[in-house]
Image (spheres, rainbow, N blue to C red):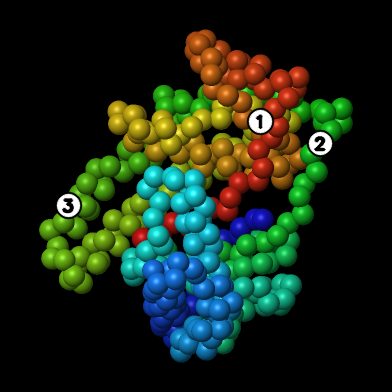
C-alpha cells in the first residue's frame, strides 16, 4: 500500500459542503459508538459492522453512503483493537472514546472503480455529488497502483488535502549475486542524527527545539484567551500551524536522508530500538521524539523495498561498546551479516496525517 498526498482547491460552496460533511460524519460516528457502548454494557456483545451500516444507512444530509460504510468499518476496527488489548492486559488501553471537533479532521471514501477518483483532465478529483462531485486538485504526479480509499483531510493550515491510498505490487528483492550495491550499517543518535559504517555523518536538525521560542510565545498567547471564545480558537489554530510546519520539516529531512541509502545499498542494517522504553528517560525524551527515529526507519524501509533492497534490524545489545566515530555502525553491520539469519522487516504501516 502506498499513499499519495495532493492539495485540493475547493470553491466556497464546496468548502461549506465539506465542513458540513465533516461535522455530520463525526456526529454519526458518536451515535454509532453510543449504540455499541449501550449494547456492550447490557449484553456484553458488539453489533457487527454491517448491522451498523444498515442502521445508519441514508442518515446525514451531506454524508455519502460510502462514508457511512467507512465509519462503521473504522469503529469495528477500533473495537477489535480494544478486545485484543484487553486479552493481552495491556496498560493504558481503554474503550473507544467519543470524538470531539478538534479530534476529527478527515472524510473517508471507499473505492468505486479503478482510476474513478481522478478525472480524465487530470485537474479534478471525482467525489460523490454530496461533496461537490468535482474538486480541483494539484496532481503534481500520477499515482501508481490501484486506488483503494481516499481521505479528504483538513490540515491545521485550513487547507484541504486528498490522501489517495493505492495498492501496489510488491517489489522483488535483488538477488545477492545480481545486485552490485554494497551493504552498510546505520547508527542513529542525538548528537549526529545518523552515522554509517563508512564514516559519514548526518547532522541532527532538531526542528522542534529550533521552534521552541515561537511555540512558547504562541502558547502563552493561547493561554491568555478566554475559553470558548473565537480568539482562543484562532490562537489554537496558530499553534497547530507551527506544529504542522515542524512535522513537515522533519518529514522532509527523513525522506532526503533515507533516499540515497535506500537506492545505493543492498542491505541496510539498523538497530531494533525499543523507543517506547527509551523515551521514559525524561532527560532525553524530548530529543528522542524530536529526532523521530521510528518514522525515519519506516520511511527507509519503504524506500528500500521500492528499490528492491532490504532493511535488516538487529538487536542493539553490545553494538555501542565501541563508539569512536563510526565504530558502533561497523558493529551493527557485522551483527547483520548474512550468516546471522536475520530477516528484513515488512512494509511499514501507513502514516496518518497530522491533525489539529
Which one is nearer the viewer's eye here, 24 or 56? Answer: 56
Q: Is residue 336 left or right of residue 229?
A: right
The image's mark for residue 174 is: 2
Which is nearer the N-term, disc 1 or disc 3?
3
Q: Which residue is mark 1?
A: 312
Residue 37 spot, x, y in % from top left: 40, 70
Residue sitting at x 52%, y 89%: 58
Residue located 36% across and 60% down the image: 356
The Cα–Cα distance between marks 1 and 3, rounded to whole angstroms, is 45 Å
Left or right of residue 337: residue 315: left
Left or right position of 34 against 319: left
Q: Secondary structure at mark 3?
A: helix
Q: Earlier in the sequence, mark 2 or mark 1?
A: 2
The picture quadrant where one finds residue 204 is top left
How busy is the neighbourhood of tag 3: few (under 14 within 10 Å), some, or many (20 plus)? few
Label of residue 220 in the image: 3
Where does the image place residue 136, in percent across and percent down from the top left?
Answer: 56, 76
Q: Give the x, y percent position of residue 86.
A: 46, 51
Residue 7 lies, with reference to residue 31, above or below; the image says: above
> Answer yes or no: do the residues labelled 1 and 3 have beta carbons within 8 Å?
no
Amino acid at each position: 500500500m502506498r499513499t499519495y498526498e495532493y492539495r485540493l482547491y475547493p470553491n466556497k460552496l464546496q468548502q461549506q459542503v465539506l465542513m458540513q460533511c465533516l461535522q455530520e460524519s463525526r456526529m454519526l460516528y458518536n451515535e454509532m459508538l453510543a449504540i455499541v457502548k449501550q449494547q456492550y454494557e447490557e449484553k456484553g456483545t458488539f453489533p457487527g459492522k454491517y448491522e451498523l451500516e444498515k442502521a445508519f444507512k441514508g442518515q446525514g444530509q451531506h454524508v455519502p453512503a460510502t462514508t457511512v460504510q467507512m465509519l462503521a468499518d473504522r469503529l469495528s476496527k477500533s473495537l477489535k483493537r480494544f478486545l485484543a488489548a484487553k486479552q493481552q492486559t495491556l496498560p493504558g488501553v481503554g474503550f473507544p472514546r467519543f470524538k470531539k471537533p478538534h479530534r476529527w479532521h478527515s472524510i473517508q471514501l471507499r473505492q468505486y472503480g479503478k482510476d474513478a477518483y481522478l478525472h480524465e483532465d487530470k485537474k479534478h478529483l471525482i467525489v460523490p455529488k454530496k461533496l461537490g462531485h468535482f474538486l480541483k486538485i494539484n496532481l503534481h504526479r500520477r499515482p501508481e497502483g490501484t486506488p483503494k480509499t481516499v481521505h479528504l483531510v483538513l490540515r491545521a493550515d485550513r487547507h484541504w488535502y486528498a490522501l489517495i491510498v493505492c495498492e501496489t505490487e510488491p517489489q522483488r528483492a535483488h538477488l545477492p549475486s545480481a545486485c552490485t550495491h554494497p551493504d552498510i550499517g546505520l547508527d542513529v543518535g542525538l548528537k549526529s542524527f545518523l552515522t554509517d559504517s563508512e564514516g559519514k555523518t548526518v547532522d541532527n536538525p532538531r526542528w522542534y527545539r529550533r521552534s521552541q521560542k515561537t511555540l512558547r510565545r504562541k502558547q502563552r498567547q493561547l493561554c491568555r484567551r478566554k475559553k470558548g471564545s473565537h480568539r482562543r480558537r484562532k490562537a489554537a489554530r496558530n499553534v497547530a500551524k507551527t506544529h504542522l510546519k515542524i512535522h513537515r520539516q522533519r518529514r522532509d529531512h527523513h525522506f532526503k536522508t533515507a533516499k540515497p541509502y535506500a537506492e545505493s545499498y543492498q542491505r541496510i542494517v539498523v538497530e531494533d530500538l525499543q523507543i517506547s522504553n527509551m523515551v521514559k528517560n525524561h532527560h532525553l525524551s524530548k530529543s528522542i521524539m524530536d529526532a523521530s527515529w521510528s518514522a525515519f526507519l519506516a520511511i527507509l524501509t519503504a524506500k528500500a523495498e521500492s528499490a528492491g533492497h532490504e532493511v535488516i534490524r538487529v538487536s542493539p545489545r553490545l553494538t555501542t561498546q565501541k563508539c569512536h566515530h563510526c565504530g558502533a555502525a561497523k558493529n551493527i553491520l557485522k551483527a547483520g551479516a548474512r550468516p546471522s539469519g536475520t530477516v528484513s522487516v515488512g512494509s511499514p504501516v501507513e502514516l496518518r496525517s497530522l491533525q489539529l
